[in-house]
Amino acid sequence: MSGTVRAAGAVLWRRQGDRIEVALVHRPRYDDWSLPKGKLDPGETIAGAAVREIAEETGFEAVLGRYLVRTEYTVAGAPKTVDYFSAHAASGAFAPNEEVDELRWLDTESAEKLLTRPGDVRVLREFSALPPELTTVILVRHAKAGKRDEWNGDDDLRPLSDAGQRQAEALRSLLRYYAPGRVLSAPRLRCVQTVNGLAEDLGVEIRHEPLLSEEGYWPDPVLGVARLLAIAGDGGTPVISSQGGVIPDVVSALADRDGVDLTAARGGVVPSKKGSFWVLSFRAPTEEDGPVLVAADYFASPLPTPAPAHP
């Protein structure tokens, strides 16, 4: 998509009593009501751009949730894409600024009527298709660690390569937009190194999860999937660093169980590149049922890349 103008935004939401409200912004330059969004800066990820633009236009600090949809249209003869997330308003307050002179918090039905562009209505409907209050689990494939046949030591101790270190630093920056609270890892040095910087930033210890390593998972995959569900059921936003021999099976097992269409899968193959991650969204457990997977979004790289595979 050479020459395409890229932007990112979000449906920014909050809970007020027993209802969910979303934020619409009025831009005097266009005299329109829209969802907060803006162009990517050079070298910026879509997640970073979405959070930054929300802060600039609305004054609110946002926590990202599931990926919603991409819209495409033409501006001044040039193609433009906008990638949207669901984003919770964690803190902040609106003040008129150069781009936005008014913000309104509305229920989704009222917001749909006020939006100027049909494309924004489509984004809002995608947001409304699922409850906004979901549990996020971020499942990371360890970053690059060189070739196994070129490492003479214990494979459990094979460290990240220089390229892997760059991926780990990118993950350290990007995953903060999801406000993680716990960091877990398969007990492999490369898995731990991938999320060590993030754990340091959060001031938490990395918890080892043997059932989510290749050696621990495959003797009893059902037990491994149950362990991930137990982690999801503990709440918060955990980050789990695992391996390429585990992640595709875990994700496909959860998707098959709960009826989630894995758009990222091609020819039935669930992707899991080194340094990639899945954002798994779960409905909260009830007295009758544990966590239920409702969405799964794949990001092929923590570096600036196209949007995740999604309808």
Image (cartoon, rainbow, N blue to C red):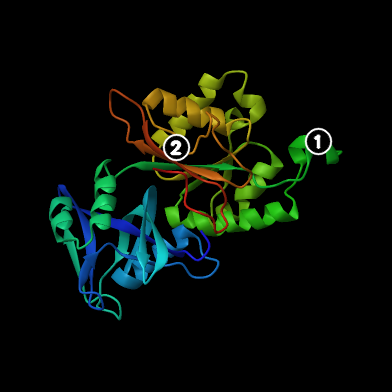
- Identify which amino acid the numbered label 2 is placed on: Thr
Left or right relative to 279: residue 99: left
Q: Which mark is residue 263?
A: 2
Q: Nearer the viewer, residue 210 or 74?
A: 74
Query: Is residue 7 in view?
Result: no
Which quadrant would residue 130 be assigned to in this image? top left
Characterize the local packing of mark 1: few (<14), some (14-19) or many (20 or more) Cα atoms within 10 angstroms: few
Badge 2 or badge 1: first in the primary sequence: 1
Q: Position of residue 18 (x, y in %)?
A: 15, 47
Characterize the local packing of mark 2: few (<14), some (14-19) or many (20 or more) Cα atoms within 10 angstroms: some
Left or right relative to 145: residue 17: left
Q: Position of residue 2 (x, y in %)?
A: 53, 62
Q: Secondary structure at mark 2?
A: loop
Which quadrant would residue 140 be assigned to in this image? top right
- Identify which amino acid the numbered label 1 is placed on: Asp
* 222 relative to 94, above or below: above
Q: Which mark is residue 154?
A: 1
Q: Nearer the viewer, residue 209 or 10?
A: 10
Q: From mark 2 to mark 1, how far is it between C-alphas?
A: 37 Å
Looking at the image, which residue is at 62% across and 22% down?
A: 218
Q: Residue furthest right?
A: 152
* 93 relative to 309, above or below: below
Query: Is residue 195 in view?
Result: yes
Which quadrant would residue 254 be assigned to in this image? top left
Left or right relative to 74: residue 42: right
* 282 relative to 94, above or below: above
| Mark nearer the viewer, 2 or 1 | 2
Q: Secondary structure at mark 1?
A: loop
- For the C terminus, the quadrant is top left
Q: Position of residue 60 (x, y in %)?
A: 32, 66
Looking at the image, which residue is at 32% across and 35% down?
A: 284
Q: Position of residue 38 (x, y in %)?
A: 38, 68
